């Protein structure tokens, strides 16, 4: 698809780019989206994405601070947790930091599962 056809949410957050069969080709984040838009209205997602062969996958067991270099470089990080792969972008980490600040003084551990993520937003 063209970058201009992406829904608003996909323009603000990282999203997977897939081929017609559903195979993952890469990831496009806000930085890649903006760079693609600067190239022109006819830029396709696959032309702006970070290809899957250029992605480094981070283990879900590492502390969130390990994501910072990926966020600084790409604007997102690819995380592997128990047989699943997910994308964490700066917005996700920012939301989680706000939750931790709201719970200041209360010991909290975020497991990173979908139930926790939905309740934290």
Image: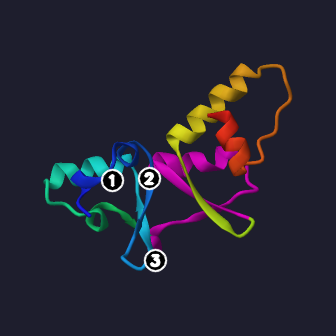
* Pointer 3 local density, CA inside 10 Å: few below 14, some 14–19, many at least 20: few
First in sequence, mark 1 or 2: give its number.
1
In the image, which disc is placed on residue 23?
3
Residue range highlighted in magenta: 52-81
How far separated are the C-alphas under marks 1 and 2? 8 Å
First in sequence, mark 2 or 3: give its number.
3
Could you tell me residue 62's position as x and y percent? Answer: 73, 53
Could you tell me residue 40's position as x and y percent? Answer: 13, 54
Q: Using the rendered view, name the quadrant where residue 58 is placed.
A: bottom right
How far separated are the C-alphas under marks 3 and 1? 20 Å
Q: Which residue is mark 2?
A: 74
Q: Which residue is mark 1?
A: 32
* Pointer 1 local density, CA inside 10 Å: few below 14, some 14–19, many at least 20: many
Taking the spot 65% from the left edge, 49% from the top edge, the residue there is 66
First in sequence, mark 3 or 1: give its number.
3
Could you tell me residue 42's position as x and y percent? Answer: 14, 60
The residue lying toward the viewer, choosing from 19 and 55, is 19
Could you tell me residue 19's position as x and y percent? Answer: 37, 75
């Amino acid at each position: 698809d063209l970058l201009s056809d992406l829904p608003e949410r996909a323009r603000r957050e990282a999203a997977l780019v897939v081929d017609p069969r559903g195979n993952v080709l890469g990831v496009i984040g806000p930085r890649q989206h903006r760079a693609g838009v600067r190239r022109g209205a006819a830029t396709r997602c696959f032309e702006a994405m970070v290809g899957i062969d250029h992605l480094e996958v981070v283990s879900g067991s590492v502390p969130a601070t390990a994501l910072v270099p990926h966020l600084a470089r790409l604007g997102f990080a690819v995380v592997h947790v128990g047989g699943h792969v997910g994308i964490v972008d700066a917005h996700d980490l920012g939301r989680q930091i706000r939750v931790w600040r709201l719970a200041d003084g209360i010991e909290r551990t975020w497991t990173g599962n979908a139930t926790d993520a939905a309740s934290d937003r």
